[in-house]
Amino acid sequence: MVTTKTDEKKLFEYILNKLVKRIEEKEGLSIFANQRSKFEGWLKVELVDILKSKNKDVRIEYSIGKKKVDVFFDNYLIELKTVNTNYTYDDKVEKKIRAITDNIDGIINDICKIINKKNYKKAILFVVFPLSDEDKWKKHLNKIDKEIGNKKILIKKEIKFCFKNSEIPGKLYFYLFN
C-alpha cells in the first residue's frame, strides 16, 4: 500500500518508466504504430505485469457499480487507452483515416466513468502515436485537462518515446486525480 505522496509519485514514476521501456523494446509494437493500430490489451498486460513485480494485488475489469475499470490495485482505479492519430508522418506510417476526436471522446468517457467515484484515487493512462503535430495535439490535450479539472490533478506526466527500429514518435500520458 502506498503511504505517502512521495511514495505514490515514486511508484508511478517507476511504473511509467517501465512501461515506456517496454514499448521501446517491443519490435512488434512498431508494426502496430506503422499501421496505426491500437494495442490497449497489450498495454494492460504489461501494466499488470509491472504491478505484480511490485507485489501488488491487481484486479482487471474491476466492477464499480455497473461499470468496469481496466485495472484496480491499492484503491487506484486506472483506465487505459491507445490513441492512434491521423497526423501525417513521412512514409514511415501508413496513411489511414483515424478519427482522433473519437479517441479523445473515449478518454473523456473513461474519465467520466471514474471521476466521481468517492474513496478511490483515479488515473487515466494513454499512449498517443504517431505524434508529429504538437500544436494540433495540444487542443485535444486541453479537452482532457478541462474534463478532469486542474484542482483535481495530483500527478500529470508525459514521456516521449520512439517505437523500436523506427523513428515513429509517441507519448505516454498519465493523470492521477481525486
Image (cartoon, grey):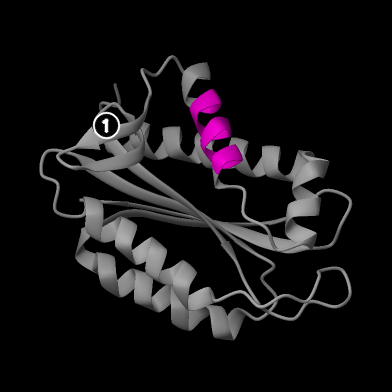
Depicted 156 relative to depicted 77: above or below: below
Pick out the residue farthest to the left. Answer: 118
Which of the pair 4/59 is nearer the observer?
59
**Prevalent SS, magenta region:** helix
Which of the 4 image quarters holds residue 26? top right
Residue 117 visible at all: yes
**In the rendered picture of this protein, how many numbered marks are placed on residues?**
1
The residue that appears at 21% across and 59% down in the rendered structure is 152
- The percent coordinates of residue 99 (x first, y second) are 55, 76
Disc 1 is placed on an element classified as loop
Q: Label 1: how many residues lie within 10 Å, few (<14), some (14-19) or many (20+)?
A: few
Q: Magenta residues?
A: 41-50
Q: Which residue is mark 1?
A: 4
Closest to the observer, 128 or 171: 128
Percent across and percent down for residue 68 are 28, 40
- Where does residue 125 sit, x and y in percent of width and height? 45, 50
Q: Quadrant of residue 94?
A: bottom right
Q: What residue sits 48% from the left and 68% below the top?
A: 103
Magenta-span inclusion, residue 42: yes
Front residue (pair 100, 175): 100
Quadrant that contains the N terminus: top left
- Identify which amino acid the numbered label 1 is placed on: Thr
Say if residue 163 shows up in the picture.
no
